[in-house]
Image (spheres, rainbow, N blue to C red):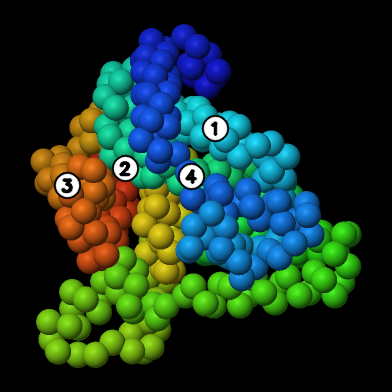
Amino acid sequence: MKGFKYWLYQSPAAKRYMLIGTGICILYFVLQKINHRDGMADFRVYYDAAKAILNDTQLYGVAFGVSSGFYKYSPFAALPFVPFALLPYAIGSAFYFFLIAVILLLFTLLLTYQQERFGVNMKAKKSWVLLLSTLFLADHFERELHLGNVNLFLMIMAFAVYYLLKKSKYKSAGWLYGLTILFKPHFLFLGFFMLWNKQWKSLLHSAIAVVFGLLIPCIWKGWKGNLTWLNQWLNAMQEHNIKLYESRNTVYGIASNFILKPLGVQAGNGLIVIVLLLVISSVIWLYIKNNREQKSQATTYVEFFVLLALIPNLVHTDTEHFMWTLPLIVFIISILLIEPIKNKNMYLFLMIVAFIPYCLNSPDLVGKEIGILFDSSGLMGVANLIFVFLSVRLLKVRNITSSLSKVE
């Protein structure tokens, strides 16, 4: 099997994808400038937070850029933006925009190439896999470029953790995993994969990384100043949270909105406990079932990235975090396009159903009212759960098909 670098340079499909994708991103950047929509609100928050660190001014409780632009992340999460804060905002934001654009295209290529490691013949319909994967994530990609958040980089960090674990580099995986938690504690859910596989060294080093990251500001703020920051961070997170069963795209909100409300039942904290236990039980059942069979690389891949994809279904967060399902979407599309799967039309139908709220939720495409409906009604969360189901189901069907082929 050729390496990714060779595949990138020698594959006509990869070259076309990079050229066309880069051209579209440049055009989008120009249009954003012309229409004065290049504020990159999320990047502005990180940029101004880094400025606050450099100037030793207030970090929490002050709006950066827009009225809702409050910094609600750990002090450590602002440190990577210090180099950008040394530049004028227009230059720093432009550089960050194209950094996201190029890495986004390369990462999509990497995920497509990764499917070859699972025995999928990517030579057959590589261009279609790239096109459809990008189409499914187009709205989320556009939102990441428009807002300038860190979700793409956190997804890549999660992928790097998976890769390092597969290479048995547990110490490095642990430190990198700890860094993702410092950006967004939601990633604690990924720890279940390490816990289940008894990767204690990775969990230990991730805990060390978290403690190290939390204490770094002591260098210039001192113990008392850093403790004040950490208390303010915890308060900021609490202020921006709501009751989970009121968060429509979470599994609790979906259960409340689509099951309890039609029955006239009021949701409460008990619903959160019951639904969370059902999700945990389902994941454990998946892991136990897979352990009974001979594990393939694809099995481990799905086990890991199902947890990543479920994060925005398990915690209250912005809909842009649903882009973390990209590794599963590339897997699903590759299998459906290339592999001889039974009942393929049924799975394609489910993909189309999920495509509507997941990919067409942009107000620019379907209008403001429908866009808000897809985002806030819970349909986005339902679509994401369909992708999770399809990845698990297609993994099972593919493993059965491969076993039968070997017998024959």
The earlier-in-sequence mark between 4 and 3 is 4
Residue at the spot x=53%, y=14% of the render?
6
Q: CA distance from mark 4 to mark 2?
A: 16 Å
Q: What amino acid type is highlighted by mark number 4? A: Met
The image shows residue 326 at horizontal and vertical percentages of 39, 43
Total marks in image: 4
The image shows residue 185 at horizontal and vertical percentages of 58, 64
Query: Disc 1 vs disc 2: which is toward the camera?
Result: 1
Local crowd size for mark 2, using a 10 Å CA cut-off: few (<14), some (14–19), many (≥20) = many
Q: Which residue is mark 2?
A: 139
Q: Are marks 4 and 3 in contact (CB under 8 Å)?
A: no
The earlier-in-sequence mark between 1 and 2 is 1
The earlier-in-sequence mark between 1 and 3 is 1
Q: Are marks 4 and 2 in contact (CB under 8 Å)?
A: no
Residue 73 visible in the snapshot: yes
Callout 3: helix, strand or loop? helix
The earlier-in-sequence mark between 2 and 3 is 2
Q: Which residue is mark 1?
A: 94
Q: Which residue is mark 4?
A: 40
Quarter of the C terminus within the rendering: top left
Q: Which residue is mark 3?
A: 366
Classify residue 206 as left or right of residue 283.
Answer: right
The earlier-in-sequence mark between 4 and 1 is 4
Residue 36's place in the image compared with 275, above or below, is above
Q: What amino acid type is highlighted by mark number 1? A: Ala
Query: Disc 4 vs disc 2: which is toward the camera?
Result: 4
The image shows residue 234 at horizontal and vertical percentages of 63, 75
The image shows residue 339 at horizontal and vertical percentages of 25, 31
Residue at the spot x=21%, y=53% of the render?
368
Q: CA distance from mark 2 to mark 3?
A: 12 Å
Local crowd size for mark 4, using a 10 Å CA cut-off: few (<14), some (14–19), many (≥20) = many
